Image (cartoon, rainbow, N blue to C red):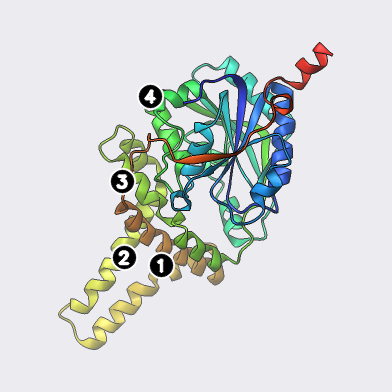
């Protein structure tokens, strides 16, 4: 691992973010200019102009050596491999840092040595998408201020805590990588915190909802929970995974629902009775969710999402794993000139010398 020689490393993980990458990089450069640090673009073999646009900025650009290694867990770990900071901040390529938050986060960690990572509010800008409206409506507890069980949406972490946990993110994961990091840290006694301040703005995918579900199946994003469980089996963190991932119980219930549907045709009943029983069991979840959400459209999307993610649970659990601590093959595409590095000194230090 590259030794820490600067204060903060902001890792931008990206895949085909040409529409957002300039804004993301500019916001990160402005943030590290105030505290001292560097910006690293961890690119997962983009096929658009993401890398080309990023080259105009004083940032380190690193890229996976093989597109087959793409995954939500691989991007952060790739950036971490090439980072030098005492602290690591993770951000997506479709996010922007909110001015002033990085200073607040560093101050909080300085005052709370028992805290491994701190984040703030993720301001969602795309509430037109059904996916993000549903997520916003759920108001998950880990998005509220205070001590939390994970830092979804990125956060600032101590390198020392990451080193104790073994690695930043599990390269095998196609989602749930932030929760995996959280349970590894918490199982070692570290705490996580979310501040009541805006940290980043985020404009998520604007694809139609069912196309987004299909994309998540093809990219293996839906497999993340199964991959998480597979990696946690036999580890101390498995208790936290089983207790805190509510989706796991939901998707296991969906799999049980499928088994019941498969068993009904085998029951010693008349054909009409079997057909009626099958129809009743098949539509029960949809009717329940329609009553709960007061919307057939939203209920249909929920049930479809359950099915995709439940299938992904099985697919991810059965997937081949590689040791997560192994270094990811990569290449450095761009290295800023020493005098242009935003990370070697802070803006305040430069002004003082001037």
Q: How far apart are marks 3 and 4 (CA)?
A: 20 Å
Q: How far apart are marks 3 and 2 (CA)?
A: 22 Å
Dot 2 or dot 4, earlier in sequence = 4
| Extreme residue toward the top, this view | 353
Q: Residue at x 54, y 63 (%)?
A: 212
Identify the element where label 1 is drawn: helix
Image position, residue 200 (x, y; %): 67, 39
Residue in the foreground of this view, choosing between 43 and 30: 43
Dot 3 or dot 2, earlier in sequence = 3
Q: Which of marks 2 and 1 is in front?
A: 2
- Are discs 1 and 4 less than 8 Å apart at CB? no
The answer to whether residue 291 of the structure is visible from this angle is no
Dot 3 or dot 1, earlier in sequence = 3
The answer to whether residue 296 of the structure is visible from this angle is yes
Q: Name the residue under label 2.
A: 257
Image position, residue 354 (x, y; %): 84, 14
Q: Which residue is drawn at 25% across and 84% down?
A: 273
Dot 3 or dot 4, earlier in sequence = 4
Residue in the foreground of this view, choosing between 86 and 229: 86
Q: Distance between the residues labelled 2 and 1?
A: 9 Å
Dot 2 or dot 1, earlier in sequence = 2
Q: Name the residue under label 4.
A: 188
Q: Name the residue under label 3.
A: 230
């Amino acid at each position: 691992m590259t030794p820490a020689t600067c204060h903060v490393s902001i890792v931008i993980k990206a895949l085909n973010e040409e529409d957002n990458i300039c804004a993301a990089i500019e916001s990160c450069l402005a943030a590290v200019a105030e505290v001292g640090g560097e910006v690293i673009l961890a690119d997962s073999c983009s096929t658009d102009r993401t890398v080309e646009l990023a080259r105009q900025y004083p940032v380190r650009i690193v890229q996976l050596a093989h597109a087959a290694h793409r995954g939500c867990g691989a991007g952060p770990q790739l950036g971490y491999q090439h980072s030098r900071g005492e602290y690591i901040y993770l951000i997506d390529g479709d996010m922007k840092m909110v001015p002033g938050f990085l200073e607040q986060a560093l101050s909080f960690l300085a005052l709370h040595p028992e805290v491994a990572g701190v984040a703030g509010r993720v301001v969602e800008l795309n509430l037109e998408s059904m996916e993000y409206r549903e997520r916003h409506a759920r108001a998950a507890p880990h998005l509220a201020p205070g001590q939390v069980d994970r830092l979804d949406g990125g956060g600032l972490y101590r390198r020392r805590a990451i080193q104790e946990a073994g690695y930043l993110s599990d390269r095998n994961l196609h989602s749930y990588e932030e929760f995996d990091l959280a349970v590894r840290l918490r199982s070692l006694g570290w705490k996580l915190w979310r501040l009541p301040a805006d940290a980043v703005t985020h404009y998520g995918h604007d694809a139609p909802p069912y196309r987004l579900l299909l994309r998540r199946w093809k990219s293996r994003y839906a497999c993340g929970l199964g991959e998480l469980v597979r990696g946690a089996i036999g580890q101390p963190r498995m208790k936290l995974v089983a207790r805190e991932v509510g989706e796991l119980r939901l998707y296991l219930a969906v799999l049980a629902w499928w088994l019941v549907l498969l068993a009904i045709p085998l029951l010693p009943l008349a054909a009409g009775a079997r057909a009626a029983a099958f129809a009743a069991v098949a539509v029960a979840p949809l009717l329940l969710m329609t009553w709960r959400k007061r919307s057939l459209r939203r209920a249909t999307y929920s049930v479809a999402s359950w099915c995709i993610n439940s299938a992904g649970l099985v697919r991810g659990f059965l997937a081949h794993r590689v040791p997560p601590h192994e270094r990811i093959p990569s290449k450095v595409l761009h290295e800023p000139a020493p005098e242009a590095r935003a990370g070697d000194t802070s803006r305040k230090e430069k002004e003082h010398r001037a």
